[in-house]
Amino acid sequence: MKTKFWEGAVDEELEKSTEKFGENHSNHESYAILAEEVEEFEEEMADIRRCLDISWTLTRKNLDTGLLKALDSMSEAAEKANTELIQVGAMIKKWKNFLNSKK
């Protein structure tokens, strides 16, 4: 289910990307750009997982020390992951635009 927020964020990112880099010129280029964005998203998700694991370790040991820092780091990674995921959506749409332009 698409939401107005998602579509708006993806369209805005697509517009920025197209202004800065132009249209995609091949499936190979489209794949490489999308793969890079997916990898960046996965890196942020790995940071979230690392922070979650730290939070669980501290929680099991009943240690509040360090927990706020872990949660702050997790929140920061989540925000970055959100940005990366919007970029993934934009690059999917950019690739689809390339394919549609070939018709």
Image: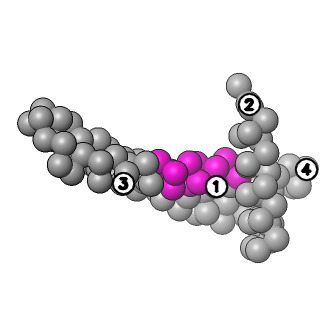
Instruction: State how far apart marks 4 and 3 are (Cα).
Output: 46 Å
Mark 4: few, some, or many residues within 10 Å (few <14, many ≥20)?
few
In the picture of the structure, the residue carrying the numbered disc 3 is 73
Q: Is residue 51 visible?
A: no
Left or right of 64, for residue 14: right
Colour scheme employed for the rendering of this structure: one colour
First along the sequence among labels 4 and 1: 1
Residue lying furthest front: 64
Query: Residue 10: where, in percent of width, then height?
Result: 73, 49
Asked where in the image residue 16 lies, by quadrant, the reply is bottom right
In the image, residue 34 above or below residue 62: below
First along the sequence among labels 2 and 4: 2
Tell me the amino acid under the disc marked 3. Ser
Residue at image point 37% right, 51% down:
72
- Residue 59, magenta (yes or no): no
In the picture of the structure, the residue carrying the numbered disc 1 is 87
Residue at image point 24% right, 41% down:
55
